[in-house]
Structures are given as C-alpha cells and as structure tokens.
Amino acid sequence: LYFSVQEGILFFYHIKDLQYEMKICADILQPISSLIFSPNYTVLLLVTDQGTVYTYKPAHSGEAVKLLDACSSCFLAADFLTPGNNYCVSVTISGEVQVWFLEDGTCLSKLNLDIEVHV
C-alpha cells in the first residue's frame, strides 16, 4: 500500500496477515495530490499541488525524480499512456494537453484546448 501525507512524504506499508511494516520512500517537500501506477506497476507518478510531476520506481527504492515542472500553468493531472510505460499524458489548468517521454521528460506533443480545465 502506497500513500502520501500533506507534507509530501510517500509511504509504503507492507501488510502480511496481522503484521505490517512502514517505510518512508520519498520526501518531495510538496503536497502530493495524486499517485498513479504504470500498467505494469513498475513506475509511480506523483503529481503535486504545485503542478510538478515526479516518478518513483519502487523496485529500485531510490528517490523520486522530478520529471515535469510547472512553468506557466500547473499540471492538474497526469496518467500513463498504454500499452507500455514509456509515455504519460498531462493536462494543465489552462487547458494544455501534453504527451511526455518518461525516460527524460521530453515533451513530444501538445494540444491547447483553449478552455480552463477543472477536476
């Protein structure tokens, strides 16, 4: 079980029978608004309240890596494009939809909806 708290800390609870173990996985110092697993559960996207997107790879137990940083408009949501785990799509509050290459954060395509987006 992965979850976050208001302070921007990503926790992992390993639960087996009546036993559990808690581990702090990452501290990104920004409140996390959503967690999205890739289709094969190898990558976790962390979207913050400030509109920054991080990736975290549970099998590598490393730090969360900043993938996308909010520039002119905050990222409102992000998700993986399937099949595979190589690309994600994001939408900003200003209505810009973008496709990203997860390996290095390259923006591959964008489309402006010309409308403000709300969730």
Image (cartoon, helix red, strand yellow):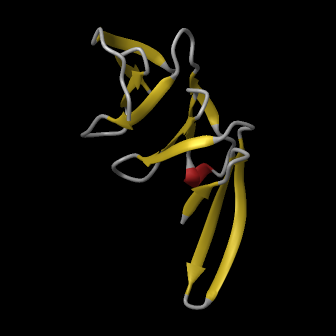
Nearest the eye: 92 or 104: 92
The answer to whether residue 100 is left or right of residue 29 is left
Q: Is residue 13 above or below residue 111?
A: below
Q: Position of residue 29 (x, y in %)?
A: 75, 37
Quarter of the image for the N terminus: give it: bottom right
Q: Give me the residue at 57% from left, 53% from top.
A: 58
Q: Is residue 76 above or below residue 10?
A: above
The answer to whether residue 28 is left or right of residue 119 is right
Q: Give me the residue at 46% from left, 15% from top.
A: 106
Residue 64 appears in the rendering: yes
Q: Position of residue 40 (x, y in %)?
A: 36, 52
Q: Position of residue 115 (x, y in %)?
A: 31, 13
The answer to whether residue 111 is left or right of residue 26 is left
Quadrant for residue 79, please give it. Answer: top left
The answer to whether residue 62 is left or right of residue 37 is right
Residue 103 appears in the rendering: no
Q: How many marks?
A: 0
Q: Is residue 47 above or below residue 52?
A: below
Q: Position of residue 76 (x, y in %)?
A: 45, 29
Quarter of the image for the C terminus: give it: top left
Q: Give me the residue at 43% from left, 21% from top.
A: 93
Q: Give me the residue at 36% from left, 13% from top.
A: 108
Nearest the eye: 16 or 79: 79
In the image, farthest residue toward the bottom: 18
